Amino acid sequence: MASKIVTFTLNGREVEVIAKPLTTLQTLLREKLGYTATKAGCKQGGCGSCTVLVNGAPMLSCLLPVEDVEGQAVTTLEGITPRDGLHPLQSAFFENYAIQCGYCTPGMIVIAKALLDRNPSPSREEIVDALSGNLCRCTGYEPIIHAIDDAARQLAGR
């Protein structure tokens, strides 16, 4: 099969790339475009470290062929981070000690962003449910849950 030109919006900017068939979005982001916050964990869809948003919905980029994002809007952690500081989720992760090795953190923040965009005031159970596809081997999840809850309260002005 021949390579294909794929056009999509990445972090608010239109990009056009040439991709071989079945190249994953994760590979393209990391190896061709330099967006390394999208981690290459298990490469099997089991850890969540590669999570990105496609049209606002969390997707595992290690399983997503690039050609499937044609015409879509893709957001990585780099696209969530403001130019002049940190997103409230990033600050909350730092302040609540929700980062240890940091490998899962980009996927966790992206998942949390999707959750808070659709539900600005989630319950603890809704936060836990949203995180269910993302693995963390360091924190025990409690600091991550607290960070997301804290960010939700900050964003809501509570």
Image: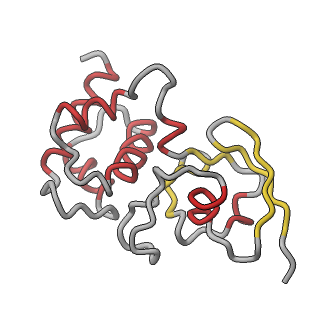
The structure residue drawn at horizontal position 66% and vertical position 58%, both measured from the top left corner, is 32
Query: Which quadrant of the structure image shows residue 22?
Result: bottom right
Task: Identify the residue shown where x is 54% and y is 49%.
Answer: 53
Say if 144 sits above or below 43 in the image. Answer: above
Q: Quadrant of residue 6?
A: bottom right
Q: Position of residue 73 (x, y in %)?
A: 67, 46
Q: Position of residue 39 (x, y in %)?
A: 44, 59
Looking at the rendered image, the quarter that the N terminus falls into is bottom right
- Tell me what residue is drawn at x 47 percent, y 19 percent: 84
Q: How is the image coloured?
A: secondary structure
Is 60 placed left or right of 137 in the picture? Answer: right
| Image position, residue 5 (x, y; %) | 85, 61
At a point 76% along the width and 41% down the height, the residue shown is: 14
Quarter placement of the C terminus: top left
For residue 77, above or below residue 40? above
Question: Looking at the image, is 72 positioned above or below residue 132?
Answer: above
Relative to residue 24, is residue 148 drawn left or right? left
Q: Residue furthest top?
A: 157
Residue closest to the far bottom: 1
Towards the viewer: 70 or 97: 97
Question: Where does the image place residue 25, in percent across and percent down from the top left?
Answer: 62, 63
Picture layout, residue 92 above or below residue 60: above
Q: How many numbered circles does the render carry?
A: 0
